[in-house]
Amino acid sequence: MNIKSTAHKLSGRITVPGSKSHTIRALILATLAEGTTHIKNPLPSADCKSTANAIPLIGAKISFGENEWTVEGAGKNIHLPSDVVNVGNSGSLLYFLSLIASTFEGWSIFTGDDSIRKRPVDHVRDVINQLGGKAYISRPGEKGCPLVIQGPISCKNTVRTPGNVSSQYITGLMMASMLMKGTLHIELSDPKETPYLTMTKVWLEKYGASVKISSDFKHIEVTAPEELKAFDNTIPSDWEGVAFPLIAALLSRDSNLIIENVDSSGTQGDDAIVEILNSIGAGIEWNKEKCTLLVKGGVRLSTENLLNKELHINISGFPDAVCALAVAACFTEGKTVIEDAGMCRKKETDRLDVLVKELSKLGAEIFATEDTLTINGHSPYLKDGSKNKEFKIHGGNVLSYDDHRMAMSLACLGLALEGEEVIVNDAECCSVSFPGFFETMNTIGSGFEKV
């Protein structure tokens, strides 16, 4: 499916679906627990459905209702996966469940789609081997799935690992500790995506675990409770999804949008996008009591009031925001440097590489190093409100690379281009994290068209 995006004014109210990160954690922990869990406002995305399809392989039962999923936990009857686990496109599911599977005696096999089979799992193999299990990558010379695991692992040894490839396998270790006796000790030399480790800590503590994380995130200890008991959960909206209607409204002229049911708990690192955009003049109003964002479009974004007149963003805590922030930077007067971004190369695509390729097609001055992304941007408007002749972003035909965040970011960019159109190829991949994205955005006036 290809999508045409042209200049439109957004207005009204929109609610973003539930958080993918929270939904997958809720599904897996409900599986480990004894009893029945009702999960309200789950994200019915492809990744979450892959998780829902996988948890019966280790003993859970799941049923789907309208805006509510019910999980009958495996509890004491949890077991080795009864079949090969195909995680689809979900890195979270791969890294979470493979570590859990390694706690069982016997062999497990994990694979996924073409994108997943390119993602590295050598770090997972390494930590399993450290804990007394055995793990193998089935294809000689490759770093990705299929991954073959022989358990069980135990927490007798301290795990030492960088933690800079992803936080997801660290979360997998923390979850796996719920099935081990004793205290799991994890030492990280270079922790990244640390807000997600905090999110995992909060979830495990809800189930009675004792979790200690040092202030620098380099030392983690997890002690499982005697019994995990089920309880009902409501999933908050996904900040990773909030980013797209937010930048769409901010960049499109005369828009006035309220985003409802935003998560004000502080457990999603991507909420940093509000402070970042406000630092360059966005004027986004976040009512944390009402859990709403008010976004007005057509404002002039500029780095002129920042140190050295440059915006520097350390993206290591919320790398999934890189696509949305890169698009916003193209409409910002001044230099934006996205730093500590190496993890963005290990997502659904090498996002630094493809952002350079696709935004360059649309006139952006953008370049990357191994660990940074730099955009020399211009606002469409001068200080007096007149058009800026230095603004060079234009329409064009761009590729999604089957990456949901690339597709949504590029589609949102087109909403801000007067008299131009952006065609996003293979845009159906948005269903991975935001089912019905284009239909939902059209309810607030985006005018996206299938072509």
Image (cartoon, rainbow, N blue to C red):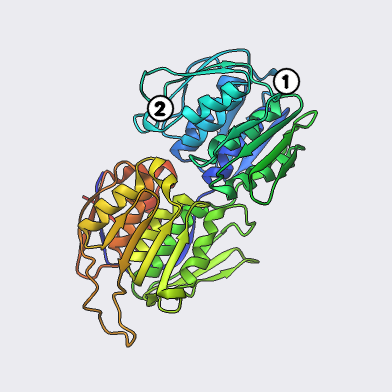
Q: Which of label 1 and label 2 is nearer to you?
A: 2
Q: Is residue 443 visible in the rendered structure shown here?
A: no
Q: Is residue 14 above or below residue 113?
A: below
Q: CA distance from mark 1 to mark 2?
A: 32 Å
Query: What is the crowding at mark 1: few (fewer than 14 residues within 10 Å), some, or many (at least 20)?
Result: few
Q: Position of residue 347 (x, y in %)?
A: 41, 41
Label count reads 2
Q: Residue at x 73, y 20 (%)?
A: 76
**In-front residue for pair 44/177:** 177
**In-front residue for pair 14/215:** 215
Residue 144 disc label = 2
**Residue under numbered circle 1:** 76
* Marks 1 & 2, CB-CB < 8 Å contact: no
Residue 20 left/right relative to 414: right
Per the image, label 2 sits on a secondary structure element best described as loop
Q: Is residue 413 above or below residue 25?
A: below
* Kind of residue indicated by mark 1: Lys
Q: Position of residue 103 (x, y in %)?
A: 64, 21
Residue 266 left/right relative to 375: right
Query: What is the crowding at mark 2: few (fewer than 14 residues within 10 Å), some, or many (at least 20)?
Result: some
